[in-house]
Structure formats: structure tokens, C-alpha cells
Amino acid sequence: MIKVENLVKTFGDFKALNEANVKVENGSVYGLVGPNGAGKSTLIRHLTGVYKQDSGEVFVDDEKVWENPKVKGKIAAIPDNWFFFNTAPISEMMRFYKGVYQNFSEERFNKLKEAFDIDVKKGIKYLSKGMQKQAAFWLALSTMPDYLILDEPVDGLDPVMRRRVWSLIMDDVAERGTTVLVSSHNLRELEDVCDHVGIMNRGKVVLERSLSELQDNMVKLQVVFKEDMTEVPSDIPMLHDSVMGRVHTMIVRMCPEAAVKCVSKYEPLLVEAVPLTLEEIFVYEVGGLEDEIKKHIV
């Protein structure tokens, strides 16, 4: 299990992490999302032991991560900008990884060559960005990690390779119980693979739920009221309302059944509940928080 408790990190006068809390259960795929500058990459650098926190704690399997080689040996990470030795081919980086990770499997490395058809003798710096990212996955998955931490992992990969990489990752989750934490702006893709989601904003994880729970507690309603009803009743807990002709599209913080029941008592001509995507949930959750912040500033 990954557990982050009240994590604080400042750079000069800027507080990048402001008492952030995260909990990632073993064997889950956890999507970390948030606007630019929310603190996602800073949090990830603490999870991998790159940064030392100002205060708070980071635990993996109930052990602190900072300066703990035993714990770090369980974690494979692919940052947005992957590091490799400037003159190294993949074969040399493989030997480096093998020396660092006790569980590195050369057998799996050779097997994965079928998925990543790249010349192991070619210098990595001469590969395209997408092929460099493939090399990063090739090496990371060969370490047989208990924890896989990814920051914008499939950026630069073509659609076929994206699907192949996610298939390999999900196979590890199913067969080995690998725990995955992934930060990405591609929310549509996260929706297909994640079972839990944490939304970050201004250095905090402001919402942490299972994806199914998030989708069950917010719904989009398309409603046509009677002609004599010109305004939406105030007892409907809306986050957003837009109107096209007579059709109201409302975002309501309720489960679909309760939302339909709440609106139905006004005898609308039409009411239909539509599931929200993860991207829509993110937009309305973060947008609502920003509106509240602006109210307090004003």
C-alpha cells in the first residue's frame, strides 16, 4: 500500500504540496489528475524518493521511502522526462537496471522484445521520443515491480503502442498484483484503466474516490420542463446548468436515481440521466472549487 500523510513541500515562497494525503490500495490502478501546477509531479517525486518532504510522511508497505533502498527496489517509475545515460544503448541500460533491481528478469526482458521491436544496440538518444518511451516501459516492466509509478506515461506513443503498453500493465496488475499510480491529462484513457481516482488542486488531494463512486454521485440530467416553468427549482442541487431551446442540461451532485426523482416531482415533459465521463467530473469538481476560492477572495 502507498500512503501519504500531510505532505508539505515548498520551493522558496511557493508551497507545491500543502498537507497532501493519498492512499493507494495494493493491486489497484490509481489515477492522479489535476490542473497544471496542482502538484502531481512533485508528489510523484516524493513517492519515488527523489524529493525529501519538508514535513509529513510517505510510506510504501508501511516503510518510509526516503533513503530506503529496500523500498525503492520495489518501485519502477517512468517520469515525463525519462533519464538514460547519454551514450547508452538499451542493452547497456538493461545491465544498469539489472545491477540496481534485484528482481530484474532478463528472461522477461528478452520476452518483451516481441512487444518492443527496437534494436537493443542502438543508442537511445538516436531513437524517436515514442521509441524512447517504449524503451522506458521495456526496462521498467522487466524489473518485476510491486509498484509502478507513471507520469504522463504514454505521451508520444502511437495508438497501437498505447494499447499494447496498457495491456502489458493490466496483465501485471491481474497476474502479479502490481499496484499502479498514474498521472495523466488524458482522462479518457485513465477512465478505461483506473479503479480509483485522486483529484489534486493547489497542492492538495481534494477528492479521492473509486471511479464507480465518483460516477454514482454526480450525474448529467437533460430536462424539458413545462412551458410555465421558466426557472430551475432551487431545491435541485446543481453544479452547472446550460439551456438550449427548452432543454436544460444540468450537472447534479446526486446519484442518478435520486436526481431523476428530485426533478420528476415537477412533472417535466422529459428527464433523462446521462453518465458523466471522468473528464466531465474533473472539470466540474475543480471548477466548483475554483469558484468557491474566488468568492472568498472577492
Image (tube, helix red, strand yellow):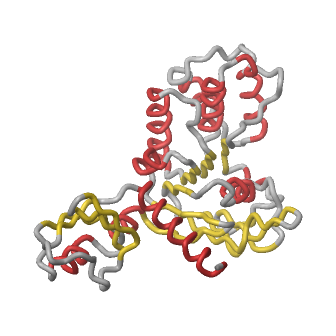
Establish if 196 lies above or below 89: below
The residue lying furthest to the bottom in this view is 235
Q: Quadrant of residue 292?
A: bottom right
Establish if 45 lies above or below 92: below
Q: Is residue 169 left or right of residue 69?
A: left
The tally of labels here is 0
Give the residue displayed 69% in from the left and 66% down from the top.
Answer: 203
Location of residue 89 in the rendering, given as x and y in whole percent from the top left corner? 75, 20
Q: Quadrant of residue 229?
A: bottom left
Location of residue 178 in the rendering, given as x and y in whole percent from the top left corner? 53, 50
Give the residue displayed 58% in from the left and 68% down from the top.
Answer: 23
Location of residue 277 in the rendering, given as x and y in whole percent from the top left corner? 37, 55
Location of residue 60 in the rendering, given as x and y in whole percent from the top left corner? 66, 63
Give the residue displayed 44% in from the left and 41% down from the top.
Answer: 171
Quadrant position of the C terminus in the picture: bottom right
Give the residue displayed 67% in from the left and 17% down from the top.
Answer: 120
Quadrant position of the N terminus in the picture: bottom right
Q: Is residue 66 left or right of residue 158?
A: right
Establish if 296 lies above or below 91: below
Nearest the eye: 125 or 47: 125
